[in-house]
Image (cartoon, rainbow, N blue to C red):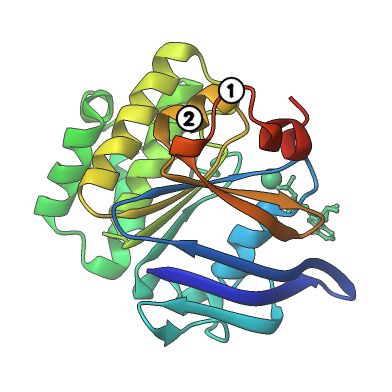
């Protein structure tokens, strides 16, 4: 389990996260919602060690990791799919997956498992990533992260700008990862998508998690969506 206590972090002199408390459990999808600028992306960067943490703790299965240099964090079992994907465009699908699996030694079994989740990628292994559709690129970004065999998967707005059929495929993959016991942390702004995937929802505003709700206790007209997302 991933557990954040009092996490404070920012960019140079600018503090963005102000004492974030947050938890994500294995086999659950924890959604993070909040308006633009609330600090959702910064939260993921702070967990990954990319934004320096000035106070508070990030615990992964009981081990404090907030002071680890960023390049050592993935090895602890945390994978992050950044907003906007950031694939290696000229590299093929297969090569992008190889990059994702480097620190785990690129085992064929892991790659097969990942490709079973996204069969469309298997058909396009030798195609440059830049020539994939937006949805396929998002699948590849997730697949690349999964080559790490993460315990915790951080997804930053993975369905942004995608067509409904692609969103459905990504949703199915998220639910399968949950069933496999991965702790999925999903930044997602669409209420209907959140209600279909989340176990719990953390609502952020002004750099902190202000409320956490069980998804089962939410509905499309719930107060929290109006308060924290403005829908
Ligand atoms: N690289 C950066 N340098 C300075 N401030 C930043 C940087 N990235 C984001 N911020 C600021 O941090 C705040 C939170 O941004 P972000 O985490 O991207 O929010 P969200 O993902 O919820 O939209 C915003 O006020 C934003 O302007
Ligand atoms: Mg963001």
Of the pair 83 and 175, the residue shown nearer to us: 175
Q: Quadrant of residue 140?
A: top left
In three-dimensional space, the C-alpha distance between marks 2 and 1, rounded to whole angstroms, equals: 8 Å
Whether residue 127 is visible, yes or no, is no
Indicate the quadrant where residue 44 lies.
bottom right
Q: Which residue is mark 2?
A: 195
In the current view of this chain or complex, which residue is farthest to the right? Answer: 13
**Image height of 22 relative to 224, above or below:** below
Report the residue at 29% width, 54% height from top. 182
The answer to whether mark 2 and mark 1 are in CB contact below 8 A is yes
Q: Is residue 157 above or below residue 149?
A: above
Q: Residues within 10 Å of mark 1 (few under 14, many from 20)?
A: few
- Mark 2 crowdedness (10 Å alpha carbons): few <14, some 14-19, many ≥20: some
Question: Which quadrant of the structure image shows residue 102?
Answer: bottom left
**Left-right relation of 129 to 162:** left
Return the x and y of residue 134 as percentages of the image width and height. Answer: 50, 23
Which secondary structure, mark 2? helix
Tell me if 39 is positioned left or right of 100 in this view: right
Q: Residue furthest left?
A: 109
Q: Position of residue 173 (x, y in %)?
A: 30, 34
State the quadrant of the C terminus: top right
Q: Is residue 95 visible?
A: yes
Element at badge 1? Answer: loop
Q: Earlier in the sequence, mark 2 or mark 1?
A: 2
On the image, the x and y values in percent for residue 123 come to 22, 23
Residue at 36% in and 75% down:
76
Residue shown at the point (22%, 35%) measured from the top left: 117
In the image, residue 191 sits, relative to residue 140, either above or below, namely above
Question: For ligand 2, which image quadrant applies?
Answer: top right
* Residue designated by label 1: 220
Position in image of residue 149 (x %, y %): 26, 59
- Give the residue at x 70% y 51%: 204
């Amino acid at each position: 389990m991933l557990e954040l206590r009092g996490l404070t972090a920012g960019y140079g002199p600018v503090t963005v996260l102000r004492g974030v408390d947050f938890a994500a459990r294995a086999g659950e999808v924890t959604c993070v919602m909040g308006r633009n600028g609330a600090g959702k992306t910064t939260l993921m960067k702070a967990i990954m060690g990319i934004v320096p943490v000035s106070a508070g703790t990030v615990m992964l299965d009981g081990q404090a990791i907030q002071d680890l240099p960023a390049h050592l964090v993935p090895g602890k079992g945390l994978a992050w799919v950044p907003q906007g994907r950031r694939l290696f465009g000229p590299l093929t699908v297969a090569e992008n997956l190889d990059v994702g699996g480097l620190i785990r030694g690129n085992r064929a079994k892991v790659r097969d498992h990942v490709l079973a989740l996204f069969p469309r990628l298997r058909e396009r292994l030798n195609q440059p990533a830049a020539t994939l559709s937006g949805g396929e690129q998002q699948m590849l970004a997730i697949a690349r992260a999964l080559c790490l065999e993460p315990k915790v998967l951080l997804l930053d707005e993975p369905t942004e700008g995608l067509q409904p059929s692609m969103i459905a495929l990504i949703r199915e993959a998220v639910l399968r990862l949950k069933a496999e016991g991965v702790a999925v942390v999903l930044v997602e702004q669409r209420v209907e998508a959140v209600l279909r995937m989340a176990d719990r929802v953390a609502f952020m505003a002004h750099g902190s998690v202000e409320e956490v709700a069980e998804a089962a206790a939410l509905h499309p007209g719930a107060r929290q969506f109006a308060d924290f997302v403005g829908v």
